[in-house]
Image: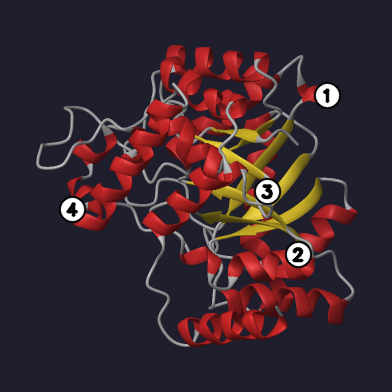
Amino acid sequence: MSALSLGAMTFGASQTNLKGVTSSEEEARRVFDRAVEAGINLVDTANVYTEGRSEELTGEWAAGKRDQLLIATKCRFPIGFGMTHKPGPHDWGLSRKAIMTACEGSLRRLKTDVIDLYQVHMQDRNVAIDETLRALDDLVTEGKVRYIGCANYAGYSLVESLWAADRLQTHRYESIQLQWSLVRRSAERELIPAAAAFGLGVLVWSPLARGFLSGKYQRGRPAPAGSRLDVHQDDLRAFDDEKNWNLLDVVGRIAEQHETTHSAVSLAWLLARPQTSSIIVGARTEAQLEDNLRALSIKLTSADLKELDEASRPDWDYPWDVLRNAEAGDAQLLT
């Protein structure tokens, strides 16, 4: 698997929650071709991205390259969710019927016989994990799916799922897709340690915090017109605090030292984390993709990493603050 993966969330026009932040099909095709040319071999999509169009375009453009590409997609949410129509009880969720129906639809749109990595898009506490795992296990046994993974799980749900797979003797989740960046480090509390303990791959989404870490946003100024945080002002307000602006200053200073960009430094910080398997980059334009690819050619120093760690350190809260302090004390006793 390549260090960077291509996120296909922005492929094609959307009328739902991605409206206004996707790429034209022509630009998306240029991004896809350049990513493949650069050695990216995993394309990550979902049945709901651009109301199924993302899967259709991924399948169309992967034709003739299928053997060199890994295709990952997801199930859980109804296609067109966020629109006015109300989905039926089996049009979404992680029941057996919902999973089987969603998988058949994805296979058809992707124009493939097998999905390399089939992920549940989010935990579903309305369905017993045993039912979900047995359905996914059948898809692997039938040869429609090679591996299964999860995304957006709480730590307790992840471990419960792994325990249930062991108990049921089914295929287990082999990866977790999670939000992780210099601005959003909450995954380090439980999910990252759990993935390391149980040998799961970690696929990172939103590594640039919805573009905040790209350097295009500045303290005290409105978001650039048409940018993602211009379209979604609530997200910009969530990032708008002194700690994050100071962090952005640190990222910019390190970028200048390495003669590179904010994006490249932010991605390189994640690439330096031993738990990272691949970072999903969702470039809307070819220029954005080129900016992201720069992360592969820089090497942050230990001093750089320490400075970024300190500038982005989250407030851990109980019990993690108590545990971290105790572990630091243990380390001192052992030296």
| Camera-side mark, 3 or 1 | 1
* Residue wearing tag 1: 67
Task: Please say if the residues under marks 3 and 2 sit with CB atoms less than 8 Å apart.
Answer: no
Q: CA distance from mark 3 to mark 4?
A: 37 Å
Q: CA distance from mark 2 to mark 1?
A: 26 Å
Q: Position of residue 155 (x, y in %)?
A: 59, 75
Q: Of the two numbered discs 4 and 1 on the same chain, state the one appearing first in sequence.
A: 1
In the image, 91: left or right of 239?
A: right
Q: Of the two numbered discs 2 and 1 on the same chain, state the one appearing first in sequence.
A: 1
Front residue (pair 68, 62) = 68
| Camera-side mark, 2 or 4 | 4
**What residue is rendered at 69% in x and 47% in y?**
277
Q: Of the two numbered discs 3 and 1 on the same chain, state the one appearing first in sequence.
A: 1
Circle 2: residue type: Ala
Task: Please say if the residues under marks 3 and 1 sit with CB atoms less than 8 Å apart.
Answer: no
| Camera-side mark, 4 or 1 | 4
* Residue wearing tag 3: 103
Q: Of the two numbered discs 3 and 4 on the same chain, state the one appearing first in sequence.
A: 3
Number of numbered tags placed on the structure image:
4
Task: Please say if the residues under marks 2 and 4 sit with CB atoms less than 8 Å apart.
Answer: no
Q: Secondary structure beneath disc 3?
A: helix
**What residue is rendered at 58% in x and 46% in y?**
302
**What residue is rendered at 55% in x and 63% in y?**
90
Q: Secondary structure beneath disc 1?
A: helix
Residue 229 lies in quadrant = top left
* Residue wearing tag 2: 135
Q: Position of residue 215 (x, y in %)?
A: 31, 32
